[in-house]
Image: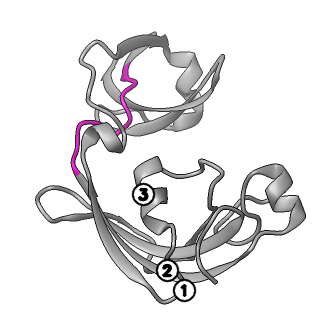
Amino acid sequence: MQIENGVVVTFHYNLIDAEGKVIESSRETDPTVYLHGADNILPKLEAEFAGKKAGDSFKITLSAADSYGERREESIERVPAKYLKHAGKLVPGKVVRLNTETGVMVVTIVKVGKFAVDVDTNHPLAGQTLTYDIEIVDAREASAEEKEHGHAHGVGGHHH
């Protein structure tokens, strides 16, 4: 099946930084699953999947602007330490989830004080040129429920 809007895509990937180091991979775990056309992955990456089918492989290199954005130096915020108690021992460089008024945000610990923690709200991959090495495992028509919910269900996708 050719990948187009309304198709559930299952794929493995390696995420590679500008120095050629693999910084993330699905190869040793379950593949990733997404609903094509539902804006669930980076737009330029999703566009590269269009027209391909199971068994196809490709690489795409994305600039920071096309992936997780440029780093914004003004994105350091101070939050009360009590909001990060769930994250265990806090040390500079640790990536944690922070509940905010607008939802969960991934932040990086910059400095830890007794009562407050400075966090970097840039995405951990912001400012980087990234290469995705993709292997498409499967492509199938999405169920009516998946289309209604706007995401794939099951292993590697969303679970209800």
Residue 45, disc: 3
Q: Amino acid at mark 3?
A: Leu
Q: Are marks 3 and 1 in contact (CB under 8 Å)?
A: no
- Is residue 33 something one can see in this rendering? yes
Tell me the SS state at disc 3. Answer: helix
Q: Are marks 1 and 2 in contact (CB under 8 Å)?
A: yes
Total numbered labels placed on residues in the image: 3
Q: Is 115 drawn above or below residue 103 in the view shown?
A: above
Q: Where residue 81 sits in the image (x, y, percent)?
A: 50, 17
Q: Please indicate whether residue 18 sits to the left or right of residue 55 in the image.
A: left
Tell me the SS state at disc 2. Answer: strand
- Is residue 125 something one can see in this rendering? no
- For marks 3 and 1, give the CA distance: 16 Å
Q: Main secondary structure of the magenta part?
A: loop
Q: Where residue 122 sits in the image (x, y, percent)?
A: 36, 28
For label 2, the residue is: 136
Question: Residue 14's quadrant in the figure?
Answer: bottom left
Question: Residue 6's quadrant in the figure?
Answer: bottom right
* Viewer-closest of 8 and 16: 8
Residue 54, disc: 1
Residue at the image position 41 percent from the left and 52 percent from the top? 44
Residue at the image position 59 percent from the left and 34 percent from the top? 86
Q: Please indicate whether residue 15 sits to the left or right of residue 147 in the image.
A: left
Q: Residue furthest bottom?
A: 55
- Quarter of the picture containing the C terminus is bottom right
Range of magenta residues: 119-129
Tell me the SS state at disc 1. Answer: loop
- Quarter of the picture containing the N terminus is bottom right
- For marks 1 and 2, give the CA distance: 5 Å
Of the numbered discs 2 and 3, the one sitting upstream in the chain is 3
Is disc 3 surrounded by few (<14), some (14 to 19) or many (20+) residues within 10 Å? some
**127 in magenta:** yes
